[in-house]
Amino acid sequence: MNFAVHCGFALLMTASLIRYVFRHGPDENTMVLVLAGLLCGLYVTAVRSRGLSAAVATWVLVAVWTVLVVLAPSFAWCAFGVFFVCRSGVPARQAAVATAVTALSTALGLFKLSGFTDIAALLGPLAAGLVLTLVYERLETALSRQAALNDELREAQIQAVAAERAAGTMAERERVAREIHDTVTQGLASTVLLLEAADRKEGLSPEVRQATEQLRLNLAETRGLVHELATADAPEEPLETALATAVRKHVADMRVAVVGQPRELPAEVRHALLRIAQSAAANVLQHAHAQTASATLGYLPHSVTLDIYDDGRGFAPDATAGHTRDGGYGLRAMRQRVEQLGGTFAVESAPGEGTVIGVEIPLFHTAESEHSEAEGGLH
């Protein structure tokens, strides 16, 4: 529509100039031609400018237009282009005043052209200005309402995509929970029952009893995992509390510290940190033979960190790059969890010098991924 208005203004200005030049002598043309050229320049400036510059250019345009149309009523038809500039170049309250001035000056110019005898020439532009103002305001209201409806529809579509994604995630979690329950959990439970029966019947060595107790712990953890997978993602306790509970199942006196201001984390980040801490604590118990161990959870502005330290016997990280059916998979699984969330994973250790496992997960990675997936669902 803007292009059509600009073309119409250019066409009307050209026709008005030709009409005026043919009807007036050279001695009368100079001032009018200067004002017409200035009006065209101001029109372009007002259209291309924004903010305060556009408002100033619009008001100067109205002033020049008033002088021009009173001096040369032949340019009265160009008022339509000036009207639209007034509606878009200044704030709403000023626009009403600017369009009123434009309509009044046009009416005076046409009334002068009629020899101050044609009342219709005086009232016509005023009525046209009023009608155009009402139509324009009605159109702006309709467009604003349509834009609001479009925003609401877009938000509803995003929420629908998110809900569908959440439902799919929940269904998959329930499926995995069922598989774990029907295989790993049942197998662990059966093994524990068999060992308890054997202990009651024949008596078991302390080592086997210790292994039985570890199986009970693993069974409890597996059942907790099944429950967590099959229920909602909302955490029931602070992350630092859950983390302390997870690591102290393996290292009872492991220290847990928090740095920064705790805040709610995405469910997948929370889950990854818990599993990494749990796996690292299990490694401390099984391999490190450490005197002390600690876990530090850090909340940074755009990421969350987890550092797990022990003063045990250490190891050469390069020597654990592979894994077998008997073990060696823990560090690789930790790294995969972190990298899937766009984070970084590091291990610092050497024989006899203890071990530090460092994790950093950016929090913006998850939010941007969900947003892009939601937008992708709109296309």
Image: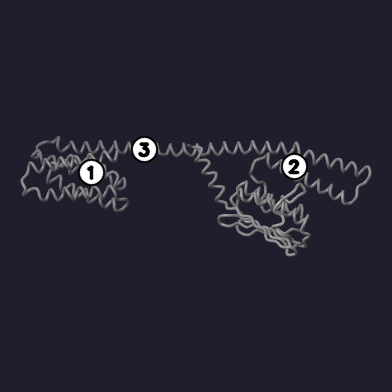
Q: Quadrant of residue 192?
A: top right
Q: Are marks 1 and 3 in contact (CB under 8 Å)?
A: no
Q: Quadrant of residue 3?
A: top left
Colouring method of the image: one colour
Pointer 2 local density, CA inside 10 Å: few below 14, some 14–19, many at least 20: some
Residue tagged by mark 1? 82
Q: Is residue 274 visible?
A: no
Q: Are marks 2 and 1 in contact (CB under 8 Å)?
A: no
Residue 5: % across, % down = 25, 40
Residue tagged by mark 3? 143
C-alpha distance separating marks 1 and 3: 22 Å
Looking at the figure, which quarter contains the N terminus?
top left
Residue 194: % across, % down = 86, 40
Is label 3 or label 2 in front? 2
C-alpha distance separating marks 2 and 1: 75 Å
Element marked by disc 3: helix
Element marked by disc 2: helix
Q: Callout 1, which amino acid? A: Val
Q: Callout 3, which amino acid? A: Leu
